[in-house]
Image (cartoon, rainbow, N blue to C red):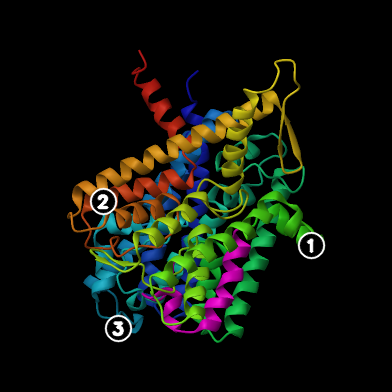
């Protein structure tokens, strides 16, 4: 059965319309910061994006509500389109500074090398896709040199992307409830958790929690001595586990153990599922250890940090045991929460800093991610648990009598044989496809880079892109080949959608072209 393109077009149009509202809101931020030269760029971007979105909606008006296949194609298509359209403010602000067609009172600054990068459309699309997918890899070599309007746009798109653009759209459009089109779209963005029976009420509750956590993060950063502008941006990108910073050295810029330790609970908070936050806010603190995923978030963060500490300490990487532990804790939590804040240099491209063992351990953290239902990407801990327990269950099944009643226990859930097989198969398919796209990314990037780059660093940067992390080993940047940039853009897109919607989109294209014959 073919995908209903009118349904996809209408829903993609609505999502694009929501993105145009983000550009309108950014006009205020540019004006408040006295960067009046950036105002036309955001206005023009908003008009273009709103026009495209409205055109889709008008052209496809009256379409049927989405079924699961349409929702999957909508998610994959929308994330690709907003990644491109979100590049307009980067491109137009850089162009405005370069050409300087506006009056003196607009405070146009001189062009610098960092902002000039965004005159290249591919680099602007890379930055936009990295932001919306909550990745944090950047083409801005020296982020300190960017105008505040672009600092804001980077942080804003990561903040929205952390919850999801479809969640934003559902909140704005308020379409239906229960198993309606809204819920189908909501599920397509790799979400299934519901706090309330109504999906619209669930989405509103998620936004309340998210805004509260963001405000708390900003306040915490202010209390430990971070300047206001920095605290706002890092509070937004930290709780969204996005990782864009206003400084080239990220959190390491402050050279403050206090700020580094204060960042860790923010990254952990972003790793916990929204329904658990909801219960915690209601006073049910036992869920911090009673919930399977949340318990494993703390276990995995602790074990991984200690292992990394041992490797780095054995390598004599840092001066003291406390510094080694602090950097290991920060970097492993940053990698596994998919935040991507940095407090230390991992690699210098062709120059090796961290050993292969330390680098690959961080890769394992990026691969697993944290809790499903949070702002985190990666495979998600619940899938990893399902894969491990399911594999053990399959092996044990060989030794059971055929008449035995079989079930799989995952946390408090007792799955029947049919349920267990279904969930195990789903986790296995996602894992296989995930690793396949990762291997393709590594092969392409290796092909276009010089052989001087260590293999583990190439794996690290591709893993960082596909897990939407943002840490890098010195490879990713404006000077990398365009082919590598394009591949990482695809890896970021695929990773944010958890593979399946992308596969459904590709399948629907092949079907429409009658290539299945």
Q: Is residue 433 visible?
A: yes
Question: Regarding mark 1 in the picture, which secondary structure is present there?
Answer: loop
For disc 2, the marked residue is 484
**Does 169 lie within the magenta span?**
no
Q: Are marks 3 and 2 in contact (CB under 8 Å)?
A: no
Q: Are marks 2 and 1 in contact (CB under 8 Å)?
A: no
Check disc 1: other Cα within 10 Å, few if <14, some if 14-19, many if 20+: few
Q: Residue furthest bottom?
A: 225
Q: Main secondary structure of the magenta part?
A: helix
At 34% from the left and 41% from the top, the residue drawn is: 439
For disc 3, the marked residue is 104
Tell me the CA gap for discs 1 and 3.
56 Å
Rendered location of residue 218, percent (x, y): 59, 76
At 47% from the left and 57% from the top, the residue drawn is: 134
Sequence-first disc among 3 and 2: 3
Tell me the CA gap for discs 3 and 2.
39 Å
Q: Residue furthest right?
A: 283
**Does 255 lie within the magenta span?**
yes
For the residue pair 124 and 218, the one nearer the viewer reads as 218
Q: Which range of residues does the magenta coloring cover?
A: 243-271
| Left or right: residue 348 compared with residue 169 | left
Q: Which mark is residue 173?
A: none
| Left or right: residue 303 compared with residue 465 | right
Question: Regarding mark 2 in the picture, which secondary structure is present there?
Answer: helix
Q: Residue furthest top?
A: 517
Check disc 3: other Cα within 10 Å, few if <14, some if 14-19, many if 20+: few
Question: Regarding mark 3 in the picture, which secondary structure is present there?
Answer: helix
Rendered location of residue 30, percent (x, y): 44, 74
For the residue pair 116 and 134, the one nearer the viewer reads as 134
At 48% from the left and 67% from the top, the residue drawn is: 310
Rendered location of residue 132, percent (x, y): 46, 55
For disc 1, the marked residue is 285
């Amino acid at each position: 059965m073919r995908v209903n393109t009118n349904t996809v077009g209408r829903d993609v149009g609505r999502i694009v319309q929501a993105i145009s509202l983000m550009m309108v809101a950014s006009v205020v931020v540019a004006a408040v910061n006295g960067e009046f030269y950036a105002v036309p760029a955001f206005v023009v971007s908003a008009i273009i994006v709103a026009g495209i979105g409205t055109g889709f909606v008008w052209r496809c008006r009256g379409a049927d509500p989405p079924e699961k296949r349409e929702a999957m194609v909508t998610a994959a298509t929308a994330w690709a389109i907003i990644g491109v359209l979100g590049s307009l403010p980067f491109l137009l602000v850089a162009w405005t500074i370069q050409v300087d067609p506006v009056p003196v009172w607009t405070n146009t600054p001189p062009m610098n090398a960092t902002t000039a990068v965004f005159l290249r459309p591919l680099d602007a699309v890379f930055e936009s896709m990295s932001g919306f997918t909550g990745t944090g890899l950047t083409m801005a070599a020296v982020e300190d040199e960017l105008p505040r309007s672009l600092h804001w746009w980077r942080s804003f798109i990561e903040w929205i992307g952390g919850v999801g653009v479809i969640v934003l759209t559902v909140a704005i459009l308020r379409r239906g409830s229960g198993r309606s089109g809204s819920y189908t779209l909501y599920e397509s963005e790799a979400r299934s958790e519901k706090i309330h029976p109504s999906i619209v009420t669930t989405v509103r509750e998620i936004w309340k929690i998210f805004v509260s956590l963001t405000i708390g993060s900003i306040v915490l950063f202010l209390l430990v001595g971070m300047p206001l502008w920095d605290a706002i941006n890092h509070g937004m990108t930290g709780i969204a586990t996005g990782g864009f910073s206003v400084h080239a050295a990220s959190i390491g810029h402050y050279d403050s153990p206090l700020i580094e330790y204060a960042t860790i609970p923010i990254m952990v908070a972003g790793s916990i599922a929204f329904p658990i936050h909801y219960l915690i806010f209601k006073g049910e603190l036992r869920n911090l250890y009673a919930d399977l995923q949340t318990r494993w978030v703390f276990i995995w963060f602790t074990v991984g940090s200690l292992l990394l500490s041992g490797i780095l300490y054995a390598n004599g990487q840092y001066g003291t045991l406390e510094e080694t532990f602090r950097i290991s804790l920060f970097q492993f939590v940053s990698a596994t929460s998919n935040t991507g804040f940095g407090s230390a240099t991992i690699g210098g491209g062709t120059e090796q800093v961290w050993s292969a063992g330390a680098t690959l351990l961080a890769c394992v953290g990026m691969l697993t991610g944290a809790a499903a239902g949070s702002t985190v990407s990666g495979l998600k801990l619940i899938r990893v648990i399902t894969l491990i327990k399911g594999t053990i269950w399959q092996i044990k099944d060989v030794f059971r009598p055929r008449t035995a009643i079989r079930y799989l226990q995952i946390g408090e859930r007792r799955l029947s044989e049919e349920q267990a097989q279904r969930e195990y198969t789903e986790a296995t398919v996602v894992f296989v496809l995930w690793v396949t796209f990762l291997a393709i990314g590594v092969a392409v990037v290796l092909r276009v880079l010089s052989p001087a780059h260590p293999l583990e660093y190439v794996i690290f940067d591709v893993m960082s892109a596909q897990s939407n992390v943002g840490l890098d080993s010195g490879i990713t940047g404006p000077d990398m080949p365009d082919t590598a940039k394009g591949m990482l853009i695809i890896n970021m897109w695929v990773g944010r959608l958890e593979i399946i919607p992308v596969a459904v989109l590709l399948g629907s294209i092949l079907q429409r072209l009658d290539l299945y014959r």
